[in-house]
Every structure is written in C-alpha cells, then in structure tokens.
Amino acid sequence: MRLDGKVAIVTGSARGIGRAIAVELAKRGVKVVINYAHSDAEARKTAELCRAHGAETLLVKADVTDREQVREMVERTIARFGGIDILINNAGILGKARDPLEVTDEDWDAVLDVNLRGAFVVTQEVLHHMKKGKIVNIASIAGKDGGTVGPHYAASKGGLIALTFNLARHLAPDILVNAVAPGPVDTGLIDEETKERLRKLSLTGQIAKPEDIAHTVVFLLENDHVTGELVDVNGGRLMD
Ligand SMILES: NC(=O)c1ccc[n+]([C@@H]2O[C@H](COP(=O)([O-])OP(=O)(O)OC[C@H]3O[C@@H](n4cnc5c(N)ncnc54)[C@H](OP(=O)(O)O)[C@@H]3O)[C@@H](O)[C@H]2O)c1
C-alpha cells in the first residue's frame, strides 16, 4: 500500500513508541490522528514533529477504554479527513509490577482494560468506517514469553496477539491485520543499570529504539501480502 495521502489513527502517540510511529508515518505523507489520554503538552509536541515533515495532523484526547470518546475520535477523523485507512493500536500501560499472588482485581482490570479491551473498542469503532486498510497492534514480548511485569500485563498482550489473529482471518482480504512484539524499548524511562542488564539479553547487544518499532510498522503497512503475523523486534532475544 502506498502510504502517501493515507489517513492513520495512532493511539497513544503523545510519546514513546506511538510518537515514533506517528513521525515515521508523517515522513511518508500520511495524515496522522494523534491520540492520547492525559499528556496534552507531549501530544502537541508529537503534532509539531509530524507537521515539521509537512503532514496534516489532528490531535484527539480520548481514553481508548471509553467507547463514547473513541466514537467521537473516529467521527472527528472522518469529518476532517473523510476516511480511515490505517489503525495502529499502540496505547498501553504496564501497570504495577506484581507477582501472581499480589495482583489485585484492580491491577488486572486496569491493564486488561487499556491494553486489550481498549484496542478492541477502537478497532470496532474504526471498522464501521474502514472498508479497506491495515491494522497493526503493538503487543509485547511478554505476550509470548510471559515477561517480567506480571500476569496481568502478559495476559493483556497475549490476548492482543490472539485478537490480531482472529481479526486477520475475519477481515481479509480487504483489511490486513498484524502485530509487533517489541522486547524492551528505550523510551527514555529506563535507568542505565537496567539498560545494561537488558542489552546483555539480546544478540545485538542493544535495546530497541522507538524508531526500530516504527520502521517495522511501516514495513507491515507497505506490504500487501502479510496478514495474521506477529513480528518480533527483540534483537534475537528469543532465539535458542
Ligand atoms: N517500552 C517498552 O519497552 C515496550 C515493550 C514492549 C511493548 N510495549 C508496548 O508499546 C506500547 C507503547 O509503549 P511506550 O513504552 O511507548 O509507552 P509510553 O511511553 O508510556 O506511552 C504510552 C502512550 O499511551 C497513551 N495511553 C495510555 N493509556 C491510554 C488510554 N487509556 N487511552 C489513550 N491513550 C493512552 C499515553 O498517553 P497519555 O500519557 O496521554 O496517557 C502515551 O501516549 C504499549 O502498548 C506498550 O505495552 C512497550
């Protein structure tokens, strides 16, 4: 698919991986809807970075767990750009790191609500308008190997991977659906000691930059013969 002139919603693009995806799309002439829930100033910064590449942007504050807010985001996108070609379900939270027996109902619900139900709500609302296009879900290595945050985060990402496969089956051939499973990504929040420990776990001796994930998303959007795939971006960490 040629990206130039297409319309994309990138959830959770105020910062981190979502921002990098928004900017990579902007560089390729995509009209970008920048979604976020709280971080007004950072979302405006993402919009500024996108516009520096000549892209049209729409900034929408909408909590992905709130169907009414999501519906309004979709309606505003249609009103402004006339359609939706691309959805990137990136919004996510880590939740509190917990051992299985420590996870409270609140911990579980908070993480599953954003990472899994939120992605589904946005997808459902977008699908009322997307007749042809691409969806990419940002999962995690935790959805494959269980990770270190806790069962709530692992289950949310494992669920997102399963959701990707289900949607790919049902929406082909008009809409292709894939997921990316990043290992640790340097979004500026990891201290040096943790970075050093994480670097040693990958074959590349590095942790990913947000742009590494964004480039993988671009590959999946441009390619028209990949659907129902989960692409690992973890420096070979899962190889035995
Ligand atoms: N960083 C990593 O090492 C890593 C590894 C594997 C997978 N991932 C996944 O990659 C995605 C992005 O992670 P990141 O590290 O870039 O996170 P981040 O820097 O914390 O950014 C998260 C983004 O999601 C938004 N968001 C959170 N809750 C939301 C909600 N309810 N509705 C709408 N937007 C919401 C945030 O906006 P507000 O600030 O406005 O709330 C922010 O823009 C997540 O799904 C994460 O699970 C990250």
Image: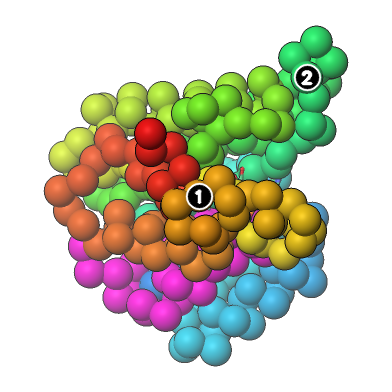
Q: Which mark is residue 202?
A: 1
| Residue beneath the point at 48% across and 87% down | 53
Assess disc 1: are there few (<14), some (14-19) or many (≥20) residues with their C-alpha within 10 Å of its C-alpha.
some
Residue 60 appearing in the image: no
19 horizontally vs 88: left or right: right
Q: Amino acid at mark 2?
A: Asp
Q: Does 180 sit above or below residue 111?
A: below
13 in magenta: yes
Instruction: Give the residues drawn in magenta, as a range.
Output: 1-29
Q: Does 183 sit above or below residue 118?
A: below
Report the front residue among 223 and 151: 151
Q: Quadrant of residue 173?
A: top left
Q: Nearer the viewer, mark 2 or mark 1?
A: 1
Question: Reading the chain from its start, which is encountered first: label 2 or label 1?
Answer: 2
| Residue beneath the point at 70% across and 41% down | 93
Where does the C terminus fall, quadrant-wise? top left
Q: Which mark is residue 99?
A: 2
Name the outermost residue toward the top.
101
141 in magenta: no
Q: Quadrant of residue 207?
A: bottom right
